Image (tube, helix red, strand yellow):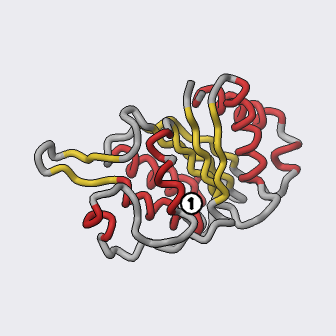
Amino acid sequence: MSRIMVALGSPREESNTKLLAQIMSEAATNAGAEVETVDAARMAIGPCTACFGCDKSGKFECVIEDDMKPLYAKFPNVDVLVLATPVYWYGPTAQIKAFMDRLYACVRFNAETHGFDTCFPEGMKMAALITAGGDAFDGADLIVNMIRHAAQGIGFGYAGTLLAARCTGPDAIRGNAALMQQARDFGRSLA
């Protein structure tokens, strides 16, 4: 059984990203996965300040006291981290980017192995769920590359991408049976 954390990055309450993540999560749950969704866009998560307090503390957590703090205790139990964001100005939302940047506290370079030690379990994977008003080359491709490179750079696997392009409103998902099936299939593949 996979343990999946979905980090939602859309600042809109009833967003396409949230709807697609719900469809994906329900399918993953039905396939036996344990899914937890954190609404990063509604949390008070400040940016990384590059203070390196996380390195100095010896813990795999950030020293900044905000809503990110309790999540560090959960990360060792996450097999798949899904970063869910709409495309905002050729990149992820500021909210999901802050969440991603604060993952820095979970990774430490190991000079002996020339690799990384992390708070995540061995075999950890990252995945992307992206919604876009434009096509795949209006910034979604850049987000996929960012998440894929981050995952691979620290030795995580990349579990794939669910991309919903040309989504300009909730009906773009609800009225698209093929996209909803793609979300269900993606959820089952993560489980």
Image coordinates for residue 169, horizontal then vertical, percent: 83, 57
Tell me the residue at 53%/55% (across/down). Answer: 71
Is residue 81 something one can see in this rendering? yes
In the picture, residue 8 is in which quadrant? bottom right
Tell me the residue at 45%/51% (across/down). Answer: 145
Q: In the picture shown, does residue 139 fall above or below 51?
A: above
Image coordinates for residue 148, horizontal then vertical, percent: 43, 46
Image coordinates for residue 125, horizontal then vertical, percent: 45, 38
Q: In the picture shown, does residue 32 fall above or below 40?
A: above
Q: Given the current orientation, which residue lies at the most extreme left position?
A: 112
Q: In the picture shown, does residue 98 fall above or below 136?
A: below
The reply, left or right, for residue 83 in relation to residue 117 is right
In the picture, residue 66 is in which quadrant? bottom right
SS at circle 1 = helix
Q: Quadrant of the N terminus?
A: top right
Q: Which residue is mark 1?
A: 139
Image coordinates for residue 36, horizontal then vertical, percent: 64, 43
In the picture, residue 12 is in which quadrant? bottom right
Q: How many marks?
A: 1
Tell me the residue at 46%/51% (across/down). Answer: 147
Is residue 86 something one can see in this rendering? no
In the foreground, 62 or 50: 62
Are there few (<14), some (14-19), or many (20+) residues within 10 Å of tag 1? Answer: many
Tell me the residue at 67%/30% (across/down). Answer: 28
In the foreground, 98 or 65: 65
In the foreground, 191 or 64: 64
The reply, left or right, for residue 173 in relation to residue 84 is right
Type of amino acid under label 1: Gly
Q: Quadrant of the C terminus?
A: top right
